Image (cartoon, rainbow, N blue to C red):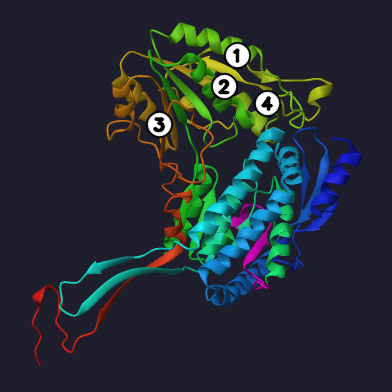
Amino acid sequence: MHSSEKKQLLKALGIHATNPGVSTGSKWIKTKGEYLASFSPADGEKIGSVQAADKASFNRIVTISAKAFKEWRTWPAPKRGEVVRQIGNELRQYKEPLGKLVSYEMGKSYQEGLGEVQEMIDICDFAVGLSRQLYGLTMHSERAEHRMYEQYHPLGVVGIITSFNFPVAVWAWNAMIAWVCGDTCIWKPSEKTPLCSIACQLIAARVFEHNKVPEGVSCLVNGDASIGKLIAACEQIPLVSATGSTRMGQAVGQQVVSRFGRPLLELGGNNAIIITPSADLDLAMRAVVFGAVGTAGQRCTTTRRLIVHEKVYVKVKERLVNAYAQLKIGDPLDPKNHVGPLIDQQAVDNYLGALEAIRQEGGTFVVEGGVLKGKKYTSGCYVKPAIAEVKNSFAIVQKETFAPILYLIKYKTLEEALDIQNDVRQGLSSAIMTMNMQEMEMFLSHRGSDCGIANVNIGTSGAEIGGAFGGEKETGGGRESGSDAWKQYMRRQTNTINYGKNIPLAQGIKFDL
């Protein structure tokens, strides 16, 4: 991106070369934290910097957010929903520049950047409807002249820790739902994509100011992992939603549980697509290639394993080699390119380490990987998507490598394919390509995929916001976004009302005085 284009983009979003990174909404808090520099993996250029939080500013943010909760929870849910509706409209106005910033700061294609902002808009729409549907239940009591029901109340301050690969959407998944539920939010974004968080905070703050929302409902604390640890340990934050690696989630989860808080974890994936003999291979190829190379393999839902029936294995392999030969790698803002860069040099090193591990364990490369060099790849973060024939038992296959490496695995029976699919520690997303009804139903049955997401004839990536998003095992067990995920952001209460003149006890117990 040319210097003039970069300046115009930042100006359109209200971002400066140097930005405060701690906010209670419309107010920015002074800190003694260090500055986080943001470098684009697209060209290696510095975009800007953000001042991180320190412990004192974090504690101040928590106090302000907790105070704001006491007022915000009194607003009727539909009125809170109206605020979120307006945020959705603001995001529509800023979709192009925000999508471009996501692409430039994170490295995903511009189309994917726009798609991420659209996810934010979609969750706003979902949350607006939800604000009139925070339903409880009524139950018949076993005691005469008694009525029972349950209801949901706002929970409190919600901590949101997000990863670099979806620098804006995952915050929106959590914040929009939490806000209509009556909670306040403290967002700790990835230190690799701090400018995206500044843009989102500015957009939300304008809407909040216009609606006289209490200062502290939308808080931002930029910083490194030390700030995430403060969130996890803070007893005034009853729910911590953390998205990222399994290692990070394990540390956060243990800390939150130790103080009897609620962890909502959405962690790694080791996702597989099963291709059966009856599969439509044209359909399958489109799903596999996007799933494997989209966002340069840096999605938690990236397709990492392709489990292919022996009857179609050779054909699938040939088609994949042909498809990969047509991939265009380069500047993510150029619409002609399919694959952008990895986020940074550490990600490149992990990618190269995985390639070496595949060789050491006896894997065979169908499509060779490597780092791309030249004028187009000045950041040093551009790599070739690779394909390797492996065994599922390989140690490297059992891990999640956040890079475009696809593992090919052969199978004979559907039962074997399902065993391979489930024989990893992660359990996020899965898919089967088949035109056979029995295979579809088996895959979706209790004997099938053990993942939180199981698809038929679509890939592992690209979940819609209407469904609850998350997975099992080392993926963490949490659910974000749609369906009834909102219940995690509220406290549940069972109520019994006696409108009679006696006090009969449950289970027929007698206690007479």
In this orientation, which residue lies closer to the viewer: 430 or 221?
430
The label on residue 424 is 3
Residue 215 % position (x, y): 67, 72
Mark 2 touches mark 1? (CB < 8 Å): yes
- 68 vs 24, left or right, is left
Q: Which residue is mark 4?
A: 339
Whether residue 222 appears in magenta in the rendering, the answer is yes
Name the residue: 73% across, 20% down: 372
Name the residue: 66% across, 52% down: 224
Mark 4 touches mark 1? (CB < 8 Å): no
> What is the number of callouts on the image?
4
Q: Secondary structure at mark 3?
A: loop
Name the residue: 55% across, 74% down: 75
Q: Residues within 10 Å of mark 4 (few under 14, many from 20)?
A: many
Q: Secondary structure at mark 1?
A: helix
| Magenta-highlighted residues | 212-228
- Mark 2 or mark 1, earlier in chain: 2
Q: Which residue is mark 1?
A: 323
Mark 4–mark 1 Cα distance, whole angstroms, equals: 13 Å
Q: Secondary structure at mark 2?
A: helix
- Mark 3 or mark 1, earlier in chain: 1
- Mark 4 or mark 2, earlier in chain: 2
Whether residue 217 appears in magenta in the rendering, the answer is yes
Q: Residue furthest bottom?
A: 513
